[in-house]
Image (spheres, rainbow, N blue to C red):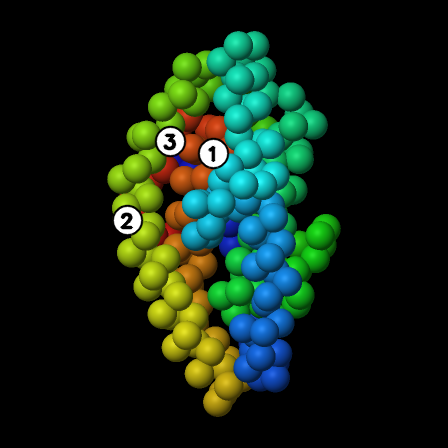
Amino acid sequence: MDYPVSYSVDYPETLNRWTTGFRIILAIPVVFLLALIGSTSFGFRPLLLLGATSVVFLPTVLLLVIRHKYPRWWFDFALNLVRLEARAAAYLFLLRDEYPSVDADQGVHLDMPYPDAEGDLNRWLPLVKWLLAIPHYVVLFFLELAAIVAAVIAWFAILFTGRYPEGLFQFVVNVLRWSLRVSAYAVLLVTDRYPPFRLGE
């Protein structure tokens, strides 16, 4: 059965060698934005309590535990915040050339179903999900290091060929998808289904 969080990135046939070559400089505002947001996805988990993501996480825990509710507007805010993070991650990992937009999907597709809090979510589980996700965080630490190495290799490939090697592209997307699913479970709290330990759909 498919996990209720989907993430994919359209594979680009060619990438701009110039913007790829200077991506480390061009990405400075993006990294700053992710730091301000306090991103919990895609390798920025240590920033959780420093930015806007804490505005999503802590009140959601309280809403679920005390009222057993997940307001639709709150979910929409969290979803759009994570979509922005996903576009920024795709840019940082060289998957897309477009500078991250605040609203357009830009070939980065992310979706999560709105949870029925009373029917789908245990009201007490948000208190321990962060603890249950620790094995994932250990695995993701090494996978995200490998994804960074893959992006560095891809950087050279793009400079010489204008293309992202498809195998490396898919590996990076799979790592980002895994990270997103863990965040959806442990931080966004949109599902009680434990994320699978697998790279792939």
Q: Amino acid at mark 2?
A: Val
Q: Is residue 177 above or below residue 129?
A: below
In the image, 195 versus 60, the foreground residue is: 60
Question: In the current view of this chain or complex, which residue is farthest to the right?
Answer: 103
Q: Amino acid at mark 1?
A: Val
Q: Which residue is mark 2?
A: 139
Around disc 2, counting alpha carbons within 10 Å, would you say few (fewer than 14), some (14 to 19), or many (20 or more)?
few
Q: Secondary structure at mark 2?
A: helix
- In the image, is 196 to the left or to the right of 201? left
Cα distance between the residues tagged 1 and 3 = 7 Å
Cα distance between the residues tagged 2 and 3 = 15 Å
- In the image, is 163 to the left or to the right of 168? right
Quadrant assignment for the N terminus: top left
Q: Which residue is mark 3?
A: 130
Q: Earlier in the sequence, mark 2 or mark 3?
A: 3
Around disc 1, counting alpha carbons within 10 Å, would you say few (fewer than 14), some (14 to 19), or many (20 or more)?
many
Residue 71 % position (x, y): 64, 21
In the image, 1 versus 155, the foreground residue is: 155
Q: Which residue is mark 1?
A: 187
Q: How many marks?
A: 3
Camera sees residue 160 = yes
Residue 85 % position (x, y): 57, 51
Question: In the current view of this chain or complex, which residue is farthest to the bottom?
Answer: 160
Name the residue located 62 percent from the left edge and 43 percent from the top edge.
81
Residues under numbered marks 1 and 3 in contact, where contact means CB atoms less than 8 Å apart? yes
Name the residue located 48 percent from the left edge and 89 percent from the top edge.
160
Q: Is residue 59 above or below residue 95?
A: above
Residue 84 % position (x, y): 63, 50
Determine which quarter of the picture holds residue 76. top right
Name the residue located 40 percent from the left edge and 56 percent from the top edge.
174
Q: Secondary structure at mark 3?
A: helix
